[in-house]
């Protein structure tokens, strides 16, 4: 089965998370019962992007249920980010009706 959410979409979301706190990122994913994948090979200068990728690496992107859990956690983070960032340099968070800074 193919991945239900593209790598490009996940990369845009990961980049968006620089506007969130580590606590917000962790809470959103943990609310959907995800744990960070400590074996993630992703390296970045941003601790927020790295933590986000660790959670993204724990999702089975071919499974509708776990992909839906990601959608629930990401939509909350996109809404929170859109309240704290200007709307003029933004990407659209699918399903939330809000814009968020990239």
Image (tube, rainbow, N blue to C red):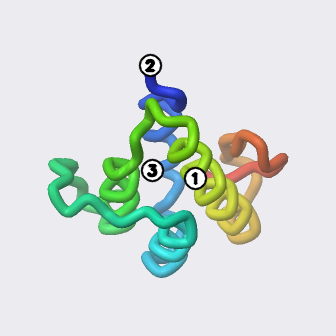
User: Within the image, what quadrant is residue 3 found in?
Assistant: top left
Would you say the residues marked 3 and 1 are in contact, meaning their CB atoms lie under 8 Å apart?
no
Relative to 64, is 35 on the left or the right? left
**In front here: 63 or 28?**
63
Q: Residue at x 68, y 53 (%)?
A: 100
Crowding at label 2, few (<14), some or many (≥20) Cα neighbours within 10 Å? few
Q: Residue at x 60, y 59 (%)?
A: 73
Question: Where is residue 2 shown, x and y percent of the image?
Answer: 44, 19
Q: In the rendered structure, which disc, 3 or 2, sits on the residue that comes first in sequence?
A: 2
Q: Residue at x 44, y 35 (%)?
A: 61
Asked if one can make out residue 15 in the rendered structure from this viewpoint, the answer is yes
Question: Where is residue 68 shown, x and y percent of the image?
Answer: 61, 45
User: Within the image, what quadrant is residue 72 found in?
Assistant: bottom right
Q: In the rendered structure, which disc, 1 or 2, sits on the residue that comes first in sequence?
A: 2
Residue that lies at the very extreme toward the bottom in this rendered image:
23
Relative to 43, is 1 on the left or the right? right
Q: In the rendered structure, which disc, 3 or 1, sits on the residue that comes first in sequence?
A: 3
Crowding at label 1, few (<14), some or many (≥20) Cα neighbours within 10 Å? some
Give the labeled residue for mark 3.
14
Q: Residue at x 68, y 46 (%)?
A: 90
User: Mark 3: which secondary structure?
Assistant: helix
The Cα–Cα distance between marks 3 and 2, rounded to whole angstroms, is 21 Å
Give the labeled residue for mark 1.
69
Relative to 95, is 6 on the left or the right? left
The Cα–Cα distance between marks 3 and 1, rounded to whole angstroms, is 16 Å
The image shows residue 21, relative to residue 72, as above or below, that is below
Question: Where is residue 77 shown, x and y percent of the image?
Answer: 62, 63
Question: Where is residue 95 shown, x and y percent of the image?
Answer: 77, 43
User: Mark 2: which secondary structure?
Assistant: loop
The image shows residue 102, relative to residue 38, as above or below, that is above
Give the labeled residue for mark 2.
2
């Amino acid at each position: 089965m193919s991945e239900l959410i593209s790598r490009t979409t996940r990369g845009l979301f990961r980049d968006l998370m620089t506007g969130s706190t580590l606590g917000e990122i962790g809470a959103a994913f943990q609310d959907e019962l995800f744990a960070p994948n400590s074996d993630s090979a992703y390296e970045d200068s941003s601790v927020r992007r790295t933590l986000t990728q660790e959670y993204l690496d724990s999702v089975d992107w071919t499974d509708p249920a776990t992909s839906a859990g990601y959608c629930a956690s990401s939509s909350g983070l996109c809404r929170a980010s859109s309240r704290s960032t200007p709307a003029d340099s933004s990407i659209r968070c699918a399903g939330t009706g809000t814009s968020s800074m990239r």
